[in-house]
Amino acid sequence: MSVQRINERGRTGCPTPPGFHSWDCACATGSRPKAPRAVYQDQALRRRTGGCREGFRLPAAAVAMAAPAPGLISVFSSSQELGASLAQLVAQQAACCLAGARARFTLGLSGGSLVSMLARELPTAAAPAGPASLARWTLGFCDERLVPFEHAESTYGLYRTHLLSRLPIPDSQVITVNPELPVEEAAEDYAQKLRQAFQGDAIPVFDLLILGVGPDGHTCSLFPDHPLLQEREKIVAPISDSPKPPPQRVTLTLPVLNAARTIIFVATGEGKAAVLKRILEDKEENPLPAALVQPRTGKLCWFLDEAAARLLTVPFEKHSTL
Protein backbone atom coordinates (compact mmCIF):
# COMPACT_ATOMS: atom_id res chain seq x y z
CA MET A 1 0.00 0.00 0.00
CA SER A 2 1.23 3.50 -0.77
CA VAL A 3 0.12 6.79 0.74
CA GLN A 4 -0.06 10.06 -1.15
CA ARG A 5 -0.71 13.44 0.38
CA ILE A 6 -3.25 15.51 -1.52
CA ASN A 7 -3.26 19.29 -1.15
CA GLU A 8 -6.18 21.70 -1.27
CA ARG A 9 -6.25 21.69 -5.08
CA GLY A 10 -6.15 17.93 -5.32
CA ARG A 11 -2.56 17.67 -6.62
CA THR A 12 -0.42 14.84 -5.41
CA GLY A 13 2.37 15.80 -3.03
CA CYS A 14 5.40 13.76 -2.07
CA PRO A 15 4.31 10.14 -1.64
CA THR A 16 5.09 8.48 1.65
CA PRO A 17 7.83 5.84 1.26
CA PRO A 18 6.48 2.29 0.91
CA GLY A 19 5.89 0.32 4.07
CA PHE A 20 4.02 0.56 7.32
CA HIS A 21 4.48 2.41 10.57
CA SER A 22 3.22 1.49 14.01
CA TRP A 23 0.17 3.51 14.96
CA ASP A 24 0.56 5.88 17.89
CA CYS A 25 -1.53 4.33 20.64
CA ALA A 26 -4.20 6.52 22.21
CA CYS A 27 -4.56 4.12 25.14
CA ALA A 28 -1.13 4.83 26.55
CA THR A 29 -1.22 6.08 30.10
CA GLY A 30 2.24 6.92 31.32
CA SER A 31 5.00 5.02 29.56
CA ARG A 32 4.53 3.55 26.10
CA PRO A 33 4.22 -0.20 25.57
CA LYS A 34 7.50 -2.08 25.49
CA ALA A 35 8.89 -4.23 22.66
CA PRO A 36 9.21 -1.31 20.19
CA ARG A 37 10.27 -3.47 17.28
CA ALA A 38 7.54 -2.48 14.83
CA VAL A 39 8.51 -1.41 11.31
CA TYR A 40 9.67 2.23 10.91
CA GLN A 41 10.96 4.06 7.87
CA ASP A 42 13.85 5.60 9.79
CA GLN A 43 15.22 6.02 13.29
CA ALA A 44 14.06 9.63 13.50
CA LEU A 45 10.48 8.54 12.98
CA ARG A 46 10.98 5.81 15.55
CA ARG A 47 12.09 8.39 18.12
CA ARG A 48 9.11 10.64 17.33
CA THR A 49 6.40 7.98 17.49
CA GLY A 50 7.59 5.55 20.15
CA GLY A 51 6.71 1.90 19.62
CA CYS A 52 4.00 -0.68 19.82
CA ARG A 53 3.81 -4.44 19.64
CA GLU A 54 5.51 -6.14 16.75
CA GLY A 55 3.19 -7.63 14.17
CA PHE A 56 0.53 -4.91 14.23
CA ARG A 57 1.31 -2.44 11.46
CA LEU A 58 -0.69 0.30 9.84
CA PRO A 59 -0.27 2.84 7.05
CA ALA A 60 1.63 5.99 7.91
CA ALA A 61 -1.63 7.94 7.78
CA ALA A 62 -2.83 6.17 10.89
CA VAL A 63 0.24 7.16 12.89
CA ALA A 64 -0.57 10.82 13.29
CA MET A 65 -4.32 11.08 13.79
CA ALA A 66 -4.78 14.82 14.11
CA ALA A 67 -6.74 16.20 17.03
CA PRO A 68 -7.89 19.49 15.40
CA ALA A 69 -11.03 19.44 13.26
CA PRO A 70 -11.64 17.90 10.82
CA GLY A 71 -9.05 15.37 11.96
CA LEU A 72 -7.00 13.16 9.70
CA ILE A 73 -8.82 12.17 6.51
CA SER A 74 -7.75 8.91 4.89
CA VAL A 75 -9.17 8.02 1.47
CA PHE A 76 -9.04 4.46 0.14
CA SER A 77 -9.50 3.26 -3.41
CA SER A 78 -12.29 0.87 -2.40
CA SER A 79 -14.49 0.00 0.54
CA GLN A 80 -12.70 -3.36 0.72
CA GLU A 81 -9.32 -1.68 1.30
CA LEU A 82 -10.94 0.66 3.79
CA GLY A 83 -12.43 -2.25 5.71
CA ALA A 84 -9.13 -4.09 5.88
CA SER A 85 -7.30 -1.02 7.20
CA LEU A 86 -10.08 -0.29 9.68
CA ALA A 87 -9.89 -3.81 11.08
CA GLN A 88 -6.10 -3.58 11.36
CA LEU A 89 -6.46 -0.31 13.21
CA VAL A 90 -8.93 -1.81 15.69
CA ALA A 91 -6.55 -4.70 16.33
CA GLN A 92 -3.64 -2.27 16.70
CA GLN A 93 -5.52 -0.10 19.18
CA ALA A 94 -6.48 -3.15 21.23
CA ALA A 95 -2.90 -4.43 21.25
CA CYS A 96 -1.57 -1.09 22.45
CA CYS A 97 -4.14 -0.84 25.23
CA LEU A 98 -3.57 -4.36 26.47
CA ALA A 99 0.22 -4.11 26.24
CA GLY A 100 0.23 -1.12 28.58
CA ALA A 101 -0.97 -0.65 32.11
CA ARG A 102 -4.66 -0.90 31.27
CA ALA A 103 -6.51 -4.15 31.83
CA ARG A 104 -8.97 -3.97 28.96
CA PHE A 105 -9.87 -2.49 25.59
CA THR A 106 -13.24 -0.75 25.22
CA LEU A 107 -14.83 -0.48 21.79
CA GLY A 108 -18.09 1.20 20.77
CA LEU A 109 -19.73 -0.12 17.60
CA SER A 110 -22.23 1.40 15.18
CA GLY A 111 -24.58 -0.40 12.82
CA GLY A 112 -25.42 -0.12 9.14
CA SER A 113 -22.79 -1.11 6.60
CA LEU A 114 -20.15 -1.25 9.34
CA VAL A 115 -21.53 -4.60 10.49
CA SER A 116 -20.67 -6.43 7.28
CA MET A 117 -17.37 -4.55 6.91
CA LEU A 118 -16.14 -5.52 10.37
CA ALA A 119 -17.56 -9.03 10.14
CA ARG A 120 -15.56 -9.57 6.96
CA GLU A 121 -12.22 -8.22 8.21
CA LEU A 122 -11.97 -8.07 12.00
CA PRO A 123 -11.78 -11.79 12.87
CA THR A 124 -8.68 -12.16 10.71
CA ALA A 125 -7.09 -8.92 11.92
CA ALA A 126 -7.70 -9.76 15.58
CA ALA A 127 -6.68 -13.42 15.37
CA PRO A 128 -2.94 -12.90 16.08
CA ALA A 129 -3.80 -11.46 19.50
CA GLY A 130 -5.23 -14.80 20.60
CA PRO A 131 -8.26 -15.68 22.75
CA ALA A 132 -6.69 -14.42 25.98
CA SER A 133 -6.43 -10.88 24.64
CA LEU A 134 -9.85 -10.92 22.99
CA ALA A 135 -11.32 -11.98 26.32
CA ARG A 136 -10.24 -8.56 27.63
CA TRP A 137 -12.26 -6.62 25.07
CA THR A 138 -15.41 -4.84 26.27
CA LEU A 139 -17.95 -3.90 23.61
CA GLY A 140 -20.76 -1.37 23.69
CA PHE A 141 -23.04 0.12 21.06
CA CYS A 142 -23.17 3.75 20.00
CA ASP A 143 -26.89 3.48 19.44
CA GLU A 144 -29.53 0.79 19.15
CA ARG A 145 -32.95 0.42 17.59
CA LEU A 146 -35.55 -0.75 20.06
CA VAL A 147 -36.47 -3.97 18.29
CA PRO A 148 -35.97 -7.61 19.31
CA PHE A 149 -32.46 -8.97 18.89
CA GLU A 150 -33.78 -11.35 16.22
CA HIS A 151 -35.09 -8.41 14.15
CA ALA A 152 -33.17 -7.42 11.01
CA GLU A 153 -32.85 -3.85 12.37
CA SER A 154 -31.17 -4.84 15.65
CA THR A 155 -27.57 -3.64 15.68
CA TYR A 156 -26.56 -6.06 18.42
CA GLY A 157 -28.47 -8.88 16.74
CA LEU A 158 -26.57 -8.35 13.48
CA TYR A 159 -23.20 -8.22 15.23
CA ARG A 160 -24.07 -11.31 17.27
CA THR A 161 -24.86 -13.27 14.11
CA HIS A 162 -22.12 -12.04 11.81
CA LEU A 163 -19.17 -11.03 14.04
CA LEU A 164 -19.42 -12.01 17.69
CA SER A 165 -20.01 -15.64 16.79
CA ARG A 166 -16.46 -15.59 15.37
CA LEU A 167 -14.69 -13.71 18.17
CA PRO A 168 -14.09 -15.24 21.64
CA ILE A 169 -15.38 -12.22 23.53
CA PRO A 170 -17.36 -13.23 26.65
CA ASP A 171 -21.06 -12.37 26.51
CA SER A 172 -20.65 -10.69 29.90
CA GLN A 173 -18.37 -8.11 28.27
CA VAL A 174 -20.83 -7.14 25.55
CA ILE A 175 -22.99 -4.30 26.87
CA THR A 176 -26.40 -4.31 25.22
CA VAL A 177 -29.61 -2.30 25.23
CA ASN A 178 -32.61 -4.24 26.57
CA PRO A 179 -35.21 -4.04 23.77
CA GLU A 180 -37.99 -5.40 25.97
CA LEU A 181 -38.11 -2.24 28.10
CA PRO A 182 -39.97 0.98 27.25
CA VAL A 183 -37.62 3.38 25.50
CA GLU A 184 -37.09 5.66 28.53
CA GLU A 185 -36.32 2.69 30.78
CA ALA A 186 -34.13 1.08 28.13
CA ALA A 187 -32.01 4.23 27.97
CA GLU A 188 -31.62 4.42 31.74
CA ASP A 189 -30.87 0.70 31.97
CA TYR A 190 -28.14 1.03 29.32
CA ALA A 191 -26.72 4.08 31.08
CA GLN A 192 -26.56 2.12 34.33
CA LYS A 193 -24.74 -0.75 32.59
CA LEU A 194 -22.21 1.71 31.19
CA ARG A 195 -21.67 3.33 34.59
CA GLN A 196 -21.00 -0.10 36.06
CA ALA A 197 -18.59 -0.98 33.25
CA PHE A 198 -16.79 2.38 33.45
CA GLN A 199 -16.61 2.75 37.21
CA GLY A 200 -14.60 5.79 38.22
CA ASP A 201 -15.48 7.76 35.07
CA ALA A 202 -18.06 10.52 35.40
CA ILE A 203 -18.59 10.03 31.67
CA PRO A 204 -17.71 6.69 30.02
CA VAL A 205 -14.41 6.99 28.16
CA PHE A 206 -14.21 4.48 25.31
CA ASP A 207 -10.81 3.63 23.89
CA LEU A 208 -12.30 3.59 20.41
CA LEU A 209 -15.64 4.55 18.89
CA ILE A 210 -16.43 3.63 15.29
CA LEU A 211 -19.13 5.91 13.91
CA GLY A 212 -21.06 6.10 10.68
CA VAL A 213 -22.63 9.16 9.10
CA GLY A 214 -25.95 9.34 7.26
CA PRO A 215 -26.73 11.30 4.08
CA ASP A 216 -28.43 13.88 6.33
CA GLY A 217 -25.36 14.23 8.56
CA HIS A 218 -26.69 12.22 11.49
CA THR A 219 -24.45 9.96 13.53
CA CYS A 220 -25.54 7.41 16.13
CA SER A 221 -29.21 8.36 16.56
CA LEU A 222 -28.42 12.07 16.78
CA PHE A 223 -30.34 13.74 13.97
CA PRO A 224 -30.19 17.28 12.54
CA ASP A 225 -32.12 19.92 14.50
CA HIS A 226 -33.15 17.39 17.15
CA PRO A 227 -33.26 18.51 20.82
CA LEU A 228 -30.90 15.67 21.77
CA LEU A 229 -28.06 17.65 20.21
CA GLN A 230 -28.36 19.97 23.22
CA GLU A 231 -28.25 17.16 25.80
CA ARG A 232 -25.38 17.71 28.25
CA GLU A 233 -26.45 15.79 31.38
CA LYS A 234 -27.41 12.30 30.21
CA ILE A 235 -24.85 9.85 28.90
CA VAL A 236 -27.55 7.84 27.14
CA ALA A 237 -30.75 9.28 25.75
CA PRO A 238 -34.01 7.80 24.46
CA ILE A 239 -35.51 8.92 21.18
CA SER A 240 -39.12 8.18 20.25
CA ASP A 241 -39.42 10.30 17.11
CA SER A 242 -36.51 9.21 14.96
CA PRO A 243 -36.95 10.56 11.41
CA LYS A 244 -35.44 7.28 10.24
CA PRO A 245 -37.35 4.10 11.13
CA PRO A 246 -37.71 2.48 13.53
CA PRO A 247 -38.78 5.53 15.55
CA GLN A 248 -37.77 4.29 19.02
CA ARG A 249 -34.05 4.17 19.70
CA VAL A 250 -31.41 4.58 22.39
CA THR A 251 -28.26 6.58 21.70
CA LEU A 252 -25.04 7.75 23.28
CA THR A 253 -24.99 11.52 23.67
CA LEU A 254 -22.42 14.02 22.46
CA PRO A 255 -20.65 14.26 25.85
CA VAL A 256 -19.84 10.54 25.66
CA LEU A 257 -18.77 10.69 22.02
CA ASN A 258 -16.46 13.62 22.69
CA ALA A 259 -14.92 11.92 25.74
CA ALA A 260 -13.56 9.01 23.67
CA ARG A 261 -9.82 8.47 23.30
CA THR A 262 -10.18 7.82 19.58
CA ILE A 263 -13.06 8.25 17.13
CA ILE A 264 -13.11 6.90 13.60
CA PHE A 265 -15.84 7.99 11.21
CA VAL A 266 -16.43 5.63 8.28
CA ALA A 267 -18.30 6.67 5.13
CA THR A 268 -18.50 5.08 1.70
CA GLY A 269 -20.33 5.70 -1.55
CA GLU A 270 -21.29 8.70 -3.69
CA GLY A 271 -24.40 9.24 -1.60
CA LYS A 272 -22.23 10.55 1.24
CA ALA A 273 -20.11 12.95 -0.86
CA ALA A 274 -22.26 16.08 -0.51
CA VAL A 275 -22.82 15.76 3.23
CA LEU A 276 -19.13 15.03 3.88
CA LYS A 277 -18.20 18.25 2.11
CA ARG A 278 -20.60 20.12 4.41
CA ILE A 279 -19.27 18.41 7.54
CA LEU A 280 -15.57 18.70 6.76
CA GLU A 281 -15.39 22.01 4.89
CA ASP A 282 -18.39 24.25 5.54
CA LYS A 283 -18.76 26.46 8.60
CA GLU A 284 -22.50 26.33 9.20
CA GLU A 285 -24.47 28.27 11.77
CA ASN A 286 -26.22 25.06 12.81
CA PRO A 287 -23.62 22.31 12.30
CA LEU A 288 -24.76 18.84 11.36
CA PRO A 289 -24.60 16.26 14.16
CA ALA A 290 -21.47 14.56 12.81
CA ALA A 291 -19.69 17.94 12.75
CA LEU A 292 -20.38 18.31 16.48
CA VAL A 293 -18.23 15.26 17.23
CA GLN A 294 -14.97 16.88 18.30
CA PRO A 295 -13.07 14.85 20.92
CA ARG A 296 -11.97 17.03 23.82
CA THR A 297 -8.58 15.37 24.21
CA GLY A 298 -8.85 12.33 21.95
CA LYS A 299 -8.08 11.71 18.30
CA LEU A 300 -10.41 12.03 15.32
CA CYS A 301 -10.05 10.28 11.98
CA TRP A 302 -12.17 9.85 8.87
CA PHE A 303 -11.93 6.70 6.73
CA LEU A 304 -13.54 7.33 3.32
CA ASP A 305 -13.58 5.63 -0.04
CA GLU A 306 -12.93 7.60 -3.22
CA ALA A 307 -16.61 7.92 -4.08
CA ALA A 308 -17.46 9.48 -0.72
CA ALA A 309 -14.45 11.83 -0.86
CA ARG A 310 -14.89 13.01 -4.46
CA LEU A 311 -16.08 16.54 -3.56
CA LEU A 312 -13.49 17.29 -0.87
CA THR A 313 -10.91 20.03 -1.33
CA VAL A 314 -9.41 19.88 2.18
CA PRO A 315 -6.11 17.97 2.50
CA PHE A 316 -6.36 14.21 2.81
CA GLU A 317 -4.14 11.16 2.45
CA LYS A 318 -4.93 8.75 -0.33
CA HIS A 319 -4.15 5.06 0.01
CA SER A 320 -3.80 2.64 -2.85
CA THR A 321 -2.59 -0.92 -3.30
CA LEU A 322 0.51 -1.23 -5.45
Image: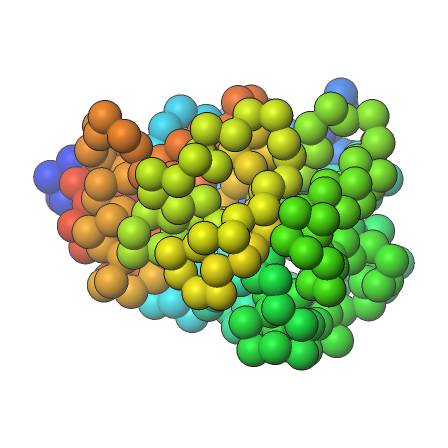
Left or right: 235 with respect to 218? right
**Which residue is rendered at x = 29% and y = 56% of the image?**
215
Q: Residue furthest left?
A: 9
Residue 307 shows in this picture: yes
Q: Nearer the viewer, residue 152 or 263?
A: 152
- Picture quadrant where residue 27 is located: top right
275 lies above or below 176: above
Q: Position of residue 321 (x, y in %)?
A: 37, 65
Q: In the displayed structure, does residue 158 sit left or right of residue 254?
A: right
- 86 lies above or below 104: below
Residue 47 lies, in percent from the top left, at 59, 25
Quarter that holds the N terminus: bottom left
Q: Position of residue 160 (x, y in %)?
A: 70, 72
Q: Position of residue 117 (x, y in %)?
A: 51, 69
Q: Residue at x 64, y 53 (%)?
A: 183
Tell me if residue 18 comes above or below residue 67 in the rendering. below
Name the one closer to the observer, 29 or 43: 29
Q: Is residue 287 left or right of residue 130?
A: left
Residue occupying the point 40% across, 24% down:
68
Please, is residue 153 above or below residue 280 in the view?
Answer: below
Question: In terms of depth relative to the viewer, which is nearer, 102 or 50?
Answer: 102
Screen quadrant of the C terminus: bottom left
